[in-house]
Image (spheres, rainbow, N blue to C red):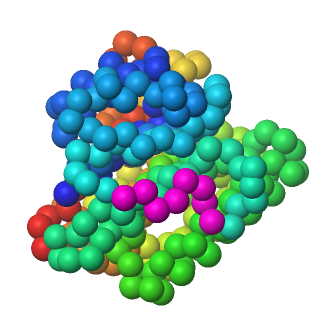
């Protein structure tokens, strides 16, 4: 099975990029963030062979799941987040080769740098709601993968020197602690499981020649429950996608599992 996550920074601007990437890599499920459109405007017909389920919002946020395998939508908002909420979560379930199902969450986590103190508090509250939700599923014995744009650099190796200030919400101690709290549930950071050290970035700002200087961040992640982590054979960002004309500032992160 192949899963992928990608903040596309506007699906209508990047639909040709997504269609080409799907054809070349053929993931079973592609989770998209920051699609920046309402569900009715999502270009589902541009991705033949893939079923699209969309949680959209006009001009901002928005997530979608594109699957070439059958899947069931479990939730279109993160449990525990007060309504009306922004379009930041879709949760699906696919059949497991071992029987039962694999729950796959797709999240566009709040950035936390806007809205002052309240904006940062909302980021932490969203991550705590996810921790509670993930804990309940793990205690129920579910196979679980949480993919998306986490808007957190977990450690110092996850950003280039000088790329962010010490008070940026993506690197503040509280944000990193919230990320660690997910790991302490027993989840595995797929990319770091296979690439434990070194530069492995998923985002480069459009400004100041960030990509050319490799002044990147690792903020797009895939966290896996134990049985999925045991089958992990590949996890890496597709850096080449950032070098294309008119790219997203994020690149896809692909994870692949061996057959049980």
Which is more toward the observer, 175 or 165?
175
Decide if residue 54 is on the left or right side of residue 46.
right
Looking at the picture, does residue 83 appear above or below residue 49?
below
Decide if residue 196 is on the left or right side of residue 230.
right
Looking at the picture, does residue 216 appear above or below residue 27?
above
Residue at 54% from the left image edge and 81% from the top image edge:
136
Quarter of the image where one finds residue 164:
top right
- Can residue 218 be seen here? The reply is no
**Residue 74 within the magenta-colored segment of the rendering:** yes
The quadrant of the picture occupied by the N terminus is bottom left
* Residue 231 rendering spot, x and y as whole percentages: 20, 70
Quarter of the image where one finds residue 95:
bottom left
* Residue 219 rendering spot, x and y as whole percentages: 51, 47
**Residue 197 within the magenta-colored segment of the rendering:** no
* Residue 224 rendering spot, x and y as whole percentages: 38, 68
Looking at the picture, does residue 29 appear above or below residue 25?
below
* Residue 108 rendering spot, x and y as whole percentages: 56, 47
Which is more toward the observer, 9 or 48?
48
Residue at 37% from the left image edge and 40% from the top image edge:
52
Looking at the picture, does residue 180 appear above or below residue 254?
below
Residue at 30% from the left image edge and 62% from the top image edge:
94
Q: Which residues are magenta?
A: 72-79
């Amino acid at each position: 099975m192949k899963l992928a996550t990608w903040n596309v920074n506007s699906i209508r601007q990047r639909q040709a990029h997504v269609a080409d990437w799907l054809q070349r890599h053929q993931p079973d499920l592609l989770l998209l963030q920051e699609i920046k459109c309402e569900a009715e405007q999502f270009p589902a017909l541009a991705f033949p062979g893939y079923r699209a389920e969309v949680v959209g919002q006009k001009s901002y946020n928005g997530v979608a799941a594109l699957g070439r395998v059958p899947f069931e939508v479990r939730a279109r908002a993160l449990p525990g987040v007060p309504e009306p909420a922004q379009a930041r979560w879709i949760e699906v379930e696919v059949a497991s080769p071992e029987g039962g199902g694999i729950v796959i969450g797709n999240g566009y986590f709040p950035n936390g740098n806007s809205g002052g103190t309240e904006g940062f508090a909302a980021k932490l509250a969203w991550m705590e709601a996810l921790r509670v939700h993930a804990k309940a599923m793990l205690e129920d014995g579910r196979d679980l993968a949480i993919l998306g744009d986490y808007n957190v650099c977990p450690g110092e190796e996850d950003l280039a020197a000088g790329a962010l200030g010490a008070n940026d919400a993506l690197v503040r101690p509280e944000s990193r602690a919230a990320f660690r709290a997910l790991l302490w549930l027993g989840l595995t950071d797929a990319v770091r499981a296979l690439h434990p050290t070194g530069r492995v970035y998923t985002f480069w700002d459009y400004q100041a020649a960030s990509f050319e200087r490799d002044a990147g961040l690792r903020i797009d992640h895939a966290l896996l429950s134990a049985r999925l982590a045991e089958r992990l054979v590949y996890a890496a960002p597709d850096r080449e996608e950032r070098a294309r004309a008119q790219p997203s500032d994020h690149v896809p992160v692909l994870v692949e599992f061996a057959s049980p």
